[in-house]
Amino acid sequence: MKLEEIEVIFYIEGLGNEKKALESALKETAENLKGEKGVEVEYARVEEVLEDPQADPLKYSGMIEAMLKGPLEEIVRLTLHYSPAIVEVVKPGKVEVDSKELMKLLGEVSLFMRKLMEEFGGLAAYPKLDDVPVPRIGFEREEIEELIIGDRNVRYRLVIEVFGKDEESIKETMAKALAIEGCRINAIVVQGEMGEKEFKGYLAAELLSPIDTLAQLVGKYAPVAISILEPEVVDITANELQNILTDLGGFVNELVTRPVRKMIADRQNTTFKL
């Protein structure tokens, strides 16, 4: 099944400490976007750069608004490449994606995110989960069918790299974390070995969740394996797709701007004694 064409508007934000440099960077980004193959670019407009003295050192901000039309895989690729702050899906109201094509697409997202995480660090972070109850694990077939047909959930398996104190504590912590993300857990297994200081291995989980939750997990955890079990065709509403693309753009932006934000924080926390 060929992936459907969709029409979206990207809102790409730029920040800087020098007005002309930011204007030049935004203009160059818009020109690069117009030159992208595989999509039709209806327009790519650069908005006026604004100044906010309170936001020093990055006191200048600007925005690119671009309307694009193309197959889903190309829109996802450009979302990862340009990390828009917001993606608005104009049409269609719903897309239907073959589960095998969706697996392939999510695999590409995972690979992209894993490379970024190797350079900038991980994304998944939770508050202390000690007081969170351990969720139920395992569902009857009738319950699974109701979640898929009635609640439009997807049943899938993910394998992610894990490390921590020991096998059992990792399993419990990850079960709680996945439940917080909005997943029903049908099965969860941890395998690996104890190193000198900590346990390292892999966690495999069979989960049920809405499609946008699955996409969030792929963006946050960059799993080494993804398998969609059912349904065979996944329908995604425009609102769900909008959430997915905006989240992915946000995840990329969070990682690539991390060094700049750290530098600003270090600068603000530094005190000088005479």
Image: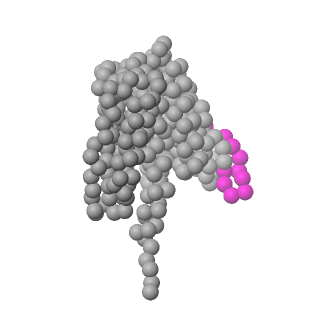
Q: Is residue 224 above or below residue 261?
A: above
Q: Residue at x 47, y 14 (%)?
A: 2
Magenta-highlighted stretch: main secondary structure? strand
Q: Is residue 111 above or below residue 227?
A: below
192 inside magenta stretch: yes
Residue 236 location, x and y as percent?
A: 38, 23
Q: Is residue 19 left or right of residue 124?
A: left
Q: Is residue 187 above or below residue 130?
A: above
Quadrant where the C terminus is found in the figure:
bottom left
Residue 27 location, x and y as percent?
A: 37, 42
49 inside magenta stretch: no
Q: Residue at x 53, y 19 (%)?
A: 100
Q: How is the image coloured?
A: one colour
Residue 126 location, x and y as percent?
A: 46, 51
Q: Residue at x 31, y 40 (%)?
A: 46
- Residue 70 makes an appearance in the image: yes
- Residue 182 makes an appearance in the image: no
Q: Is residue 241 left or right of residue 177?
A: left
Which is more toward the observer, 141 or 3? 3
Q: Which residues are magenta?
A: 187-199
**Which residue, as the protein is rendered here, is positioned at the far bottom?**
274
Q: Is residue 183 above or below residue 71?
A: below
Q: Residue at x 46, y 43 (%)?
A: 252
Q: Is residue 197 left or right of residue 60?
A: right
